[in-house]
Image (spheres, rainbow, N blue to C red):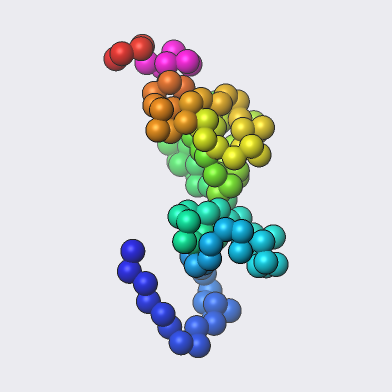
Amino acid sequence: MDTEVVDGLDPRNYDQIFKVYVACFAPEEQKLETLKELPWCRFHKEYLFVEPGDKSVGIKMMVDHFKGNYKDVVVFGDEKNDLSMFRDEWTSIAMGNAIDELKEKATYVTTPCDQDGIYNACVHFGWIKEND
């Protein structure tokens, strides 16, 4: 990832900000009071990101555009930035390595992502047959 440092940058001078990366090691983020009200998650050991978008809004827009049914929507997630898309209207699958808050909201908790979590969830729900 290329990094550009802009002296005097003031985020208040922008109409829209889609994602902000903050360089800090855990547990240093606990000292950042402004993070307490923002949707953020740790992305790497060196930094975290703030992503204020509500993923469920984009999902609903796509389903509405194609005149689909929310009951046919399936989402997978593992981190805090996925909480907004875990809704009762559709199937929400938490990866086995997901944060506890996401697992509590999930329709189903599968195995961790590095243990074929998506595949195993698809087998569990009968969307594919094992070894397809």
90 drawn magenta: no
From the image, give the main secondary structure of the stretch colored magenta.
Answer: loop
Quarter of the rendering occupied by the C terminus: top left
x, y percentage for residue 20?
50, 66
Measuring from the top left, give residue 61's x and y in whole percent: 50, 44
Compared with 62, 95 (above or below) is: above
Horizontal side, residue 14 vs residue 84: left or right: left
Residue located at (66% from left, 32% from top): 104
- Which residue is pictured at 55% across the width and 37% down the height? 98
Q: Which of 87 and 80 is in front in this view?
A: 80
**Residue at the location (52% across, 39% down)?**
78
Quarter holding residue 65: top left
Residue most extreme to the left: 132
Residue 30 appears at what percent x and percent y?
67, 61
Q: In which quarter of the image is residue 79?
A: top right
How many numbered discs, if any?
0
User: Looking at the image, can residue 70 be seen?
Assistant: no
| Quadrant containing the N terminus in the rendered view | bottom left
Q: Give the x, y percent position of residue 120.
A: 43, 21
Extreme residue in the bottom direction:
8
Left or right, 90 with reference to 7: right
Query: In the picture shown, does residue 30 fall above or below 41?
Result: below
Q: Is residue 125 magenta?
A: yes
Residue positioned 37% across, 72% down in the render: 3
Q: Is residue 54 visible?
A: yes
Q: Where does the magenta region start and end?
A: 123-128
Q: Choose between 10 and 65: the one closer to the eye.
A: 10
